[in-house]
Image (cartoon, rainbow, N blue to C red):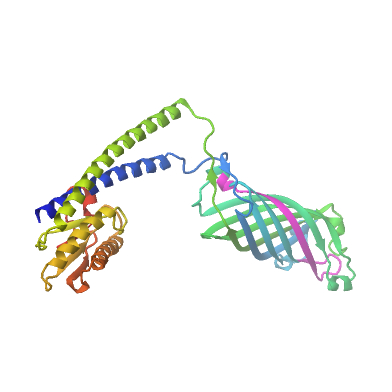
Amino acid sequence: MKKLFLLCVSVLFAAGSYAQTSEEVVVMEVQDVQSVSKYPSVRGFVSNGFWDNWELSFGGGLSMMSTSNLVFKDMPGSFGDRLGFEVNVAATKWFHPVFGARLQLAGGRFRNISQLGGNTQRTPYMFVHTDLMINFSNWAGGYRADRAYYAVPFVGFGYMAMDFTDRAHDLGYGTNQELAFTAGLLNKFRIAKGWDLDIELKGMLFGEKDLPASLNSGGAYAVAYSATAGFTHRFNDRNWKRQMPQKYTDADIAAYTAAIAALEGSLAAARNNEKSLADQLAAANKALQDAKGKKEVFVNGACPAFFKINSAALSQRNKILLDLVADEINASPADKTFTVSGYADKETGSAAYNQKLSEERAQAVAEYLESKGVKADRLIVKGYGATVQPFSGNIENNRVVVIK
């Protein structure tokens, strides 16, 4: 049993040394990631694939039209008499966190009071246009993937058609078609990972000469407005990656050189530690071979099996130890039971996570012992999470299962 105790101490020392070296490397990697700016400027982004950063939108709301000679206060009827409606669908491709292009199809009906007879004039319209989209929030405030609101002004042009329905033709109006321009502001509110709530304010400019005589004031152009609300779904990769810098300052080079030197020092230390671990493993194997030739009974001591951080997987070193423990248990009186207690260190993870991890570690040890002939009814399996820390000193020593 003295040799069993020495074997346990040897494994304890090896596990603590290995965990310390691993955590040093992890800390260096985290520091390297944090050296990259979280909110880069407009320049220096990698363009995503063609099918990334697409958006499909739909919405609906109100529309209104006025002419160049008759502003709102001069037009017949009340404000409510001139409210029509609009629905729209759009596809947008973002080529950059700031710049994108959109194709939108908008349709609806303008509603005005005739200047000739005073009756309600309903003008159906269809407007397909392409727009340049500018994400002003990313431009002015720097790109941020977690931003909740985006202000996106846009400008574009396209094809406008009016009075194309059979009803309009029955009233004597011919279909009017012309080039039209648009500009506006799209307000985007991020409501879920792939969804935005949109509120769009849009203006449309087109020639007045093509309006019906009942609406034509003799001016050069007409102006229409719409205010719509809707939703956008964003597809595939929605975020942006920053390019690595192409030029480095002397300070950058000095910092990189120092980091390389530190890594080389860590590598040399790890190699020395590897040799030490190899010597300890050889000693542990020799102790195991010596112990297997004896028929000692497992006494009320305790022997630990150690685990890597966030892991319940048995290492080869653990299995060598458990082979010896299984032999000792199988050689002990048949009515003797043993407790397999799992733990997790308190420095990492939540209480619930550590409880589950400790139970998984204890179960992994119990199942291995059973595979070596130990009967399941001789084992009591418990998990204590991080509520109990069996070893003082290095926290790595508490990533353990203790067999008593």
Residue 400 percent coordinates (x, y): 22, 57
Q: Is residue 116 visible?
A: yes
Q: Where is the C terminus found, in terms of image quarters?
A: bottom left
Task: Name which quarter of the figure residue 321 lies in.
Answer: bottom left
Helix, strand or loop: magenta stretch: strand
Residue 391 percent coordinates (x, y): 17, 53
Task: Name which quarter of the figure residue 172 lies in.
Answer: bottom right
Q: Answer whether residue 120 is magenta in the image.
A: yes
* Magenta region, residue range: 109-138
Residue 399 percent coordinates (x, y): 24, 55
Picture layout, residue 383 above or below residue 139: below
Q: Residue at x 27, y 44 (%)?
A: 20
Q: Is residue 344 visible?
A: no
Picture layout, residue 65 above or below residue 13: below
In this picture, residue 318 sits left or right of residue 89: left
In this picture, residue 23 sits left or right of residue 141: left
Picture layout, residue 100 above or below residue 247: below
Task: Please state which of residues 290 and 115 is positioned toward the viewer in this rendering.
Answer: 290
Q: Answer whether residue 62 is magenta in the image.
A: no
Task: Please state which of residues 32 and 293 is positioned toward the viewer in this rendering.
Answer: 293
Task: Please state which of residues 364 and 393 is positioned toward the viewer in this rendering.
Answer: 364
Query: Can you name the residue that lies furthest to the front here?
Result: 293
Q: Residue at x 21, y 67 (%)?
A: 382
Residue 371 percent coordinates (x, y): 26, 67
Q: Residue at x 39, y 32 (%)?
A: 260
